[in-house]
Image: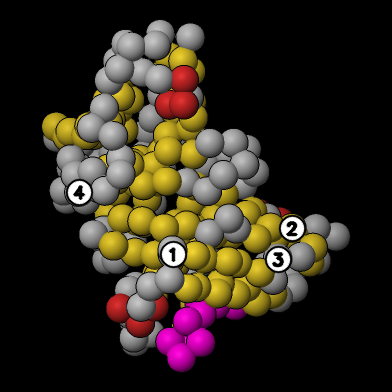
Amino acid sequence: QSALTQPPSASGSPGQSVTISCTGTSSDVGGYNYVSWYQQHPGKAPKLMIYEVTKRPSGVPDRFSGSKSGNTASLTVSGLQAEDEADYYCSSYAGSYKYVFGTGTKVTVL
Amino acid sequence: EVQLVESGGVVVQPGGSLRLSCATSGFTFGDYGMHWVRQVPGKGLEWVSLISWDGGRTYYADSVKGRFTISRDNNKNSLYLQMNSLRPEDTALYCCTRGTNWSFDYWGQGTLVTVSS
């Protein structure tokens, strides 16, 4: 199972928006509405930000939103804040009770 | 408060074996499937294994299938990963995570496994 493809980095100024893509195949991202996104600050455990493509867990700000088109999912962070600077990973169910993660994107708040 | 605490990570020689544990609290452990996910320091995440709520079904990444065994004890609220025939490429931080809605909603801080001679 190959890792999902994410851009290595993305950046934006405070208040702006940044969108991170996550590209897979019809066997994972394109085949199921089970894409999730995780935020990881240095030295910390990942935190679930989006599940089932578009849903936000309780406590996650509505500045974070998810979408999907074909084999590519996206995470958009609107109204960037300093605390949004972190690594972000996508994940997708890949069938047969297996999962695959993305390569990760480092978001920098300029 | 949901807590997941891993232990058992050490330095081990190639070909060696190791058993990781994950002690949980703050939720009804037996109601959830549980996963192991690993992360090479400074690198990305890799899904390793899943066990069903009752332990009756287990699933593995191709990279560890036949070498690793996931198990659980619902009476002890604990998850385990038996790792055999370890390889240098298994060196990583191993995290246990709770499975919900086809995602991983709570994570432990991880335990570091280093495979080196």
Specify the label residue B16 is tagged with: none
Q: Which residue is mark 1?
A: B2
What residue range appears in magenta?
Answer: B73-82
Q: Which residue is mark 2?
A: B114
Residue that extends furthest to the bottom in the rendered view of this protein: B75
Element type where label 1 sits in the image: loop
Q: Which residue is mark 3?
A: B9
- Sequence order check, earlier mark of 1 and 2: 1
Asked if marks 1 and 4 fall on the same chain, the answer is no
The secondary structure making up most of the magenta span is: strand
Give yes or no for residue B77 being in the magenta stretch.
yes
- Sequence order check, earlier mark of 1 and 3: 1
Question: Could you tell me the amino acid type at mark 4?
Answer: Glu
Percent of width and height locating residue B40: 62, 47
Residue that extends furthest to the right in the rendered view of this protein: B117
Q: Which residue is mark 4?
A: A52
Q: Nearer the viewer, mark 3 or mark 2?
A: 3
